[in-house]
Image (cartoon, rainbow, N blue to C red):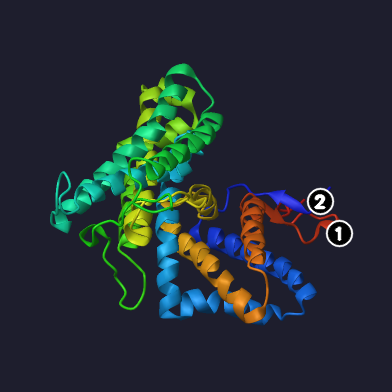
Amino acid sequence: MARLFERRLVPADSPAAIMATTSAAFLAAMLAAAFLFVSYDASPFQAYYALFHEPFATLRGFGYSLVRASPLALIALGTIVSWRSGFSYLGFEGCFVVGAAAAGWVALLTAQGAAIGPIPFILFLPLAILAAYLAGGAWAGIVGLVRARLGGNEVLISLMSNYVAIFILQYLVSGPLRAPGSLPESRLFPKGSWLPFILPGTRAHAGILIAIAAAGIVWVLLKKMPLGYEFIVTGFSPSAARYAGIDVGRRLLLASFFAGGLGGVAGLTEALGSQHRLMDGISGGVGFVGIVVALLARLNPLAVIPTALLYGGMSVGADAMQRRASIPSSITFILQSLAVLLVLAFDVLRYYKINFDFRRGTPSSTAPQVSE
């Protein structure tokens, strides 16, 4: 009996097939979200024009899109490393916060009259990146150690660790690092520690360049290096990895440290590139949104940057859509959520094909006839 869906002999894993299913899912999400505009008597074309014109067709909006994309891309890259290694880590919000705190602490030490004092930016940036990377890596590495040595549930532990990191930052900006005043925030970082702006007339900073470099490093790690191969084998089948002589526990610990370090560097881009100070609520949930970006990119490091740019640009365009079309920006979050759900749902088309002849009872591919 013919069926509507028939399983493919080989999954469609070509870049063209992945791009086609992703584009179809995104268009379907836009079509479904368009019905929400009816209650506001707004044209979907006008709303979508405002949503995408501001972040991608204006220099100022594009600069803000780059700013939003930088931490999202770095957290998505960390998610790819951890998840493809079989480490289901969800604590990037905590890595982001401790990374921002570490980078901010180094920046405050380079202020005039502080312990280190002013130093050239070419020396400061590697020092700040190292501090943020080690802080984020250690934060995630603790969870990796518990999982590798004690068999703990990394999902629950990592989720709870996010709140610990947030409370630690609240303590720092309300106590030891608090600037004179009523707001829980640190002093403004020295301008010599700010990430340089890369687009004149915009707020776009060098954080996006750090994210692009990190994407290249992760791609090389997972595709070209033996360590990345061991990460992937460990994620696919720990028992097969052990049979091949791979130390699964050690690889899991390394993957957690590497992924957490990327989350910590994401915090650096926000602290030194956008806020220029430590403050309560600096993360704004970006640690969870970065995981969504990784899913939309299908855990492909090379697809992370354009995906993060699209997702961050939509966040920027949501405000423009609210101003120009009088539509709540919350519809944009509904669109983003639908896009994630449909991208995951449309992934089935890579493993199954549609049989348009199922009603006639004939399969899409018939066996060759044998002549008598």
Dot 1 or dot 2: first in sequence order is: 2
Q: Residue furthest front?
A: 181
Circle 2 is placed at which residue position?
2
Measuring from the top left, give residue 363's x and y in whole percent.
Answer: 77, 54
Left-right relation of 37 to 117 = right
User: What is the three-letter code of the residue carrying label 1?
Assistant: Arg
**Relative to 291, 210 lies left or right:** left
**Is label 1 in contact with label 2 (beta carbons under 8 Å)?**
yes
Left or right: 32 in relation to 311:
right
Q: Is residue 56 above or below residue 286?
A: below
Question: Which of the 4 image quarters holds residue 122?
Answer: bottom left
Q: Is residue 225 visible from the viewing direction of this image? A: no
The crowding category of the residue bearing disc 2, from other C-alpha atoms within 10 Å (few below 14, some 14 to 19, many at least 20), is some
Q: Nearer the viewer, residue 22 or 306?
A: 306
In the displayed structure, would residue 350 be above or below residue 32?
Answer: above
Between 152 and 235, the one lying in front of the other is: 152
Residue 28 location, x and y as percent?
A: 68, 65
Residue 360 — which label? 1
x 41%, y 43%: residue: 174
Which residue type carries mark 2? Ala
Q: Is residue 186 above or below residue 15?
A: above
Q: CA distance from mark 1 to mark 2?
A: 8 Å
Task: Give x and y (percent) for residue 356.
Answer: 77, 61
Q: Nearer the viewer, residue 16 or 271?
A: 271
Mark 1, Cα crowd under 10 Å, few <14 / some 14-19 / many 20+, is few
Residue for point 61% across, 60% down? 336
